[in-house]
Image (spheres, grey):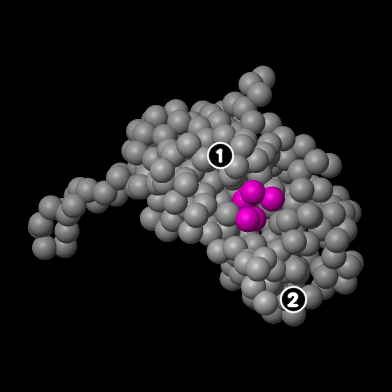
Amino acid sequence: MSDNAVQIRDLVKTFGGGRSLFGRKSNEVQAVKGISLDLRRGETLGIVGESGSGKSTLARMLVGLEAPTSGSMLIDNKPWADLASSGSRAFGRTIQYVFQDPVASLNPRKTIGQILDVPLKLLCGHDATRRAIRKRELVDAVQMPLDTLERYPHEFSGGQAQRIAIARALAAEASIMVLDEPVSALDVSVQAQVLLLLQQLRDDLGLSYLFISHDLAVVESISDRVAVMYLGEVVEVGPAAQLFASPQHDYTRSLIASAPRLNPDAA
């Protein structure tokens, strides 16, 4: 088995280029331009870059929400094309997506117990008895009380809702998670709690994370390595501490220089 949870080679994603409603040819836009990247098993790989750099397009391709134009991806040693031909359930058992807005990602008409039932039944095939046990284990894993299962998404704060969204991702028993700005909507103190939880789950369960964020401080704190994206390309990859201490690419340097910092000399 490969040491890589995800292996990406020469990946391209192009939008447009077809005919519009009025018969005019639309412009072709390359959102991802031939990138190659590896996510190692048990690793957190941070992805940083400005809006429009291709980060979320990459994430959506990985979890099967967008099809690549060309290139190849191996996800847990499975070719992307094989997962796609097997349907969405194959992706769900292999790789999970945690969204930026936790409340919006949860069905407001369902209790948390009913929400967790879906992956446990459809992806894992557990019977009612096993599902009941797993639901209790899942809320405990994300440090939420047992009565969480009987409540609805609107009853929770943003940080609590993100814990529940993480529990839902864990329910599928996939070993890889794509976390797309998972703490950007949370207060700073709550961010720290959720990041600690993610690190604990990764270490306890042997998970691999692709962690997307525009917040350089967050990425530096949680990532083993960091990949910097600019205009659809990966321009620099390296260990987090090394990349932030000694960036090699001009764009990386400008990103770090533009990040807000506290002024220790300020009164």
Q: Which is more toward the observer, 160 or 51?
A: 51
* Residue type at tag 2: Phe
Residue at (10% x, 57% y) in the render: 24
Q: Secondary structure at mark 2?
A: loop
- The image shows residue 10 at horizontal and vertical percentages of 39, 29
Q: Is residue 185 above or below residue 170?
A: below
- Which mark, residue 246? 1
Q: Which residue is mark 2?
A: 156
Q: Residues within 10 Å of mark 1 (few under 14, many from 20)?
A: few
| Stretch in magenta | 217-221
Residue at (78% x, 65% y) in the render: 113
Q: Which is more toward the observer, 87 or 19?
A: 19
State which quadrant residue 266 falls in: bottom right
- The image shows residue 69 at horizontal and vertical percentages of 34, 38
Q: From the image, which quarter does the C terminus lie in?
A: bottom right
Q: Is residue 199 above or below residue 152?
A: above
